Image (cartoon, rainbow, N blue to C red):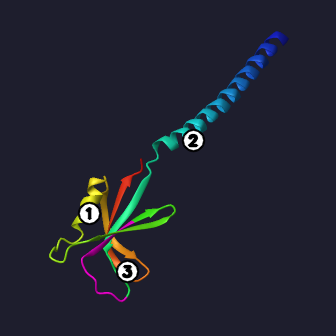
Amino acid sequence: MSKYFTVVAFLLFAFTAGFWVSEKFSKQAIVQAQSSGNNANIQKWEYCAVSPAKYANSNRTGVYWITYFKDSGVQVVEFEDAPTERNGPAKAIAKLGAEGWELVTEAPLDTRYAQLDALYFKRQKP
């Protein structure tokens, strides 16, 4: 009878230890897979906006800004139509399209001088 209890105790111990080891390594494998997989699947985007330029105390027209939003701040590039052209922001939009930017939405853009209507674009970071 003591052999029977010894065998049962050993099997119970082996099963419990095996389950504990298996569970521990499974959790580690899941954590490693999640942490390494997250970085590979995250899409990173960059954004910009096209808006009419607005200078303080100026009536200047036909000028548009592309505002690039960067980690270090904003960068503004100016586009100006000739006085005889009435294409609006077409040059700025064509430039962004050629660079792989995609139109996302239209919304206000707050600047130092005014709130402007803007077209927002995004593209995937390389």
Residue lying farthest to the left in this orientation: 84
- Residue 119 is drawn in which quadrant? bottom left
Residue 88 placement (x, y as % from top left): 21, 72
Give the amino acid type for the residue marked by disc 3 in the picture.
Gln
Q: Which residue is mark 2?
A: 35
Inter-mark Cα distance, 3 to 1? 20 Å
Q: Secondary structure at mark 1?
A: helix
| Residue at numbered disc 3 | 115
Residue located 65% across and 27% down the image: 22
Q: Nearer the viewer, residue 99 or 22?
A: 99
Q: Position of residue 96 (x, y in %)?
A: 29, 59
Identified at 60% across, 38% down, the residue is 31
Q: Position of residue 117 (x, y in %)?
A: 31, 76
Q: Is residue 1 at least partly visible in the picture?
A: no
Q: Considering the numbered disc 2 on the image, is that residue within a helix, a strand or a loop?
A: helix
Q: Nearer the viewer, mark 3 or mark 1?
A: 1
Q: Which residue is mark 1?
A: 93
Q: Amino acid at mark 1?
A: Ile
Q: Quadrant of the N terminus?
A: top right
Question: Marks 2 and 1, how far apart in space?
Answer: 38 Å
Q: Of label 2 and label 1, which has the lower sequence position?
A: 2
Say whether residue 76 is left or right of residue 17.
left
Q: Nearer the viewer, mark 2 or mark 1?
A: 1
Q: Report the span colored magenta.
A: 57-67
Q: Residues within 10 Å of mark 3 (few under 14, many from 20)?
A: few
Q: Residue furthest bottom?
A: 57
